[in-house]
Amino acid sequence: MRRYRTDVLVIGSGLSGLYAALLLAERGLRVVVATKENIEVSNSHVAQGGIATVMDSGADSFQKHRDDTLAAGDGLNRPAVVDFFVRNGPAVIEDLAALGVSFTRHEDGSFDLGREGGHTARRVVHADDITGTEIISALKSRVLADRRIEIWQHHMAVDLITTRKFNLSEENRVVGAYVLSHEGIVVTVEADAVLIATGGCGKVYLYTSNPDVATGDGIAMGYRAGVPVENMEMVQFHPTILYHEKVRSMLISEALRGEGGILKTRDGRTFMEHYHPMKSLAPRDVTARAIDRELKKRGDDYVLLDMTMLDPDFIVHRFPNIFKRCLDAGIDMRREPIPVVPAAHYLCGGLQSTPEGRTCLPGLFVAGEAAHTGLHGANRLASNSLLEAAVMARYAAEEIASWLRGSRRPHHPLPLWSEEGVSDSDEQVVVKQNWDEIRHCMWNYVGIARSDRRLERALKRISLIRQEIAEYYWNFRVTRDLLELRNLALVAELIVRSAIMRRESRGLHYTIDHPAKEPEAKDTVITAGVVVS
């Protein structure tokens, strides 16, 4: 199979991708979901905390959720966008529950609501401490049972196909994508609309909570096709990732601090009171920066998250998965603190889009972490990520259906992928070397604390690496490793260039050379074409 036609191509199988696919199929559209791993491998799947939304009108309100989101976002949110997501939260919770998601409830049937850093009320709807796993499991069973949806596992999108690229029409629009199959064949997928739901880019950093698939593919493809990116410098480092020599990338949910966990230095002293009035419940940007500063000041490798003052039975009941995984690693969180460090976790920037997922490129839509809508501002409030993913998926499905009803679609066949003049590579060491160098460079120079000098060094190194990758890309047959490296390098450069553009410290972007905020909060925007792909 070298050519395939469908109504909608969805790239990615997290919450946004699977939920949107179901809603599109309900509208009678044929959908292909292309995912480069097994269907359940995604950031959504490993999300622990839950979905932040107002479900208790007596103790909470839309205004409170809005205010908390704006406070965390440090002046860079778009208030109207925040209102849109906050007010649409309860509806998607009810919809997901109707689709089979088993959220944790009280005996009377009401939702059990957790609290996390930066929240002034309990509003996190969850499924124990494995919310993402439960959501993806329920959506997966529905998607696999729907005959209008095809799931292409181990298929990686190479690039979007636009009419301008092949002079197919005067109006530029997306008409499909090239997709690399697990057999190594590049399929030309002709689609009337494409939804990017590929998640974030945590693997651009050496230490991350993200699974290996998070290489910024959708952002890179969208940018190469002509969509601007916004606020790419706003990379959120989760404050608490398990520090362990054998257990990799294990997230210790913010909900632990929400239920009373206290951050301490290795000698048992509390420190968050020196950084924020909410102490250990401070927003993530403040907490990650505080931990980073304490580690550098003391020369320690980790800090401690202490839960031992809480009832042991409550810990086991509220956090069964985290408790078991810590116990498997030799840590009994009922009796001893958990060693934790910050790690790259979430991208608050992304492809410029409306809250409904529209981009400036007709036929291309985006949902979830790959999008920048203005919801998160300079720092994401905990558990607003799954809220954004679900709400965007719901409205993107409506936008796509509306677009297909009113658009004129070119029906002539698209050019097949060409491998003329290329050969198989016998130098995989080049890919590995560049991959490692990018991640070390980003961690050391573009991490939690930045400087002008570090950013300039990072830009020089990554620009040279991208030149090497481009030569490699055009001379050898594409592989998943090469495609991920190409995307990772582009996203890394976009992050660095955005960081250089922001001459202030705001939210997740802290620079020792510009510690103060500018009087006016402004987005950093890089228009496609500024960075040559």
Image (tube, grey):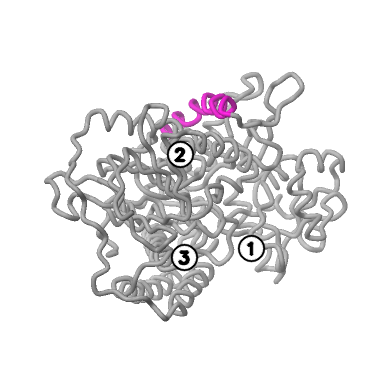
Q: Nearer the viewer, residue 282 or 172?
A: 172
Label 3, label 1: how far apart the Cα atoms are: 16 Å
Mark 1, residue position:
293
Report the front residue among 308 and 89.
89
- Residue type at mark 2? Leu
The mark closer to the camera, 3 or 1, is 1
Q: Residue furthest front?
A: 1
Vertically, is 226 above or below 300? above
Secondary element at image label 2 = loop
Label 1 vs label 2, nearer the camera? 2
Q: Which residue is mark 3?
A: 513
Residue visible at 73% across and 45% down in the picture:
256
Q: Is residue 138 above or below residue 455?
A: above
Along the polypeptide, which appears first: circle 3 or circle 1?
Answer: 1
The region drawn magenta spans 79-99
Residue occupying the point 36% across, 73% down? 469
The three-letter code of the residue at mark 1 reads: Arg
Could you tell me residue 112's position as x and y percent?
A: 70, 29
436 within the magenta span: no
Q: Residue at x 71, y 38 (%)?
A: 128
Quarter of the N terminus within the rendering: bottom left
Residue 243 showing in the rendered view: yes
Does residue 64 appear in the picture of this structure? no
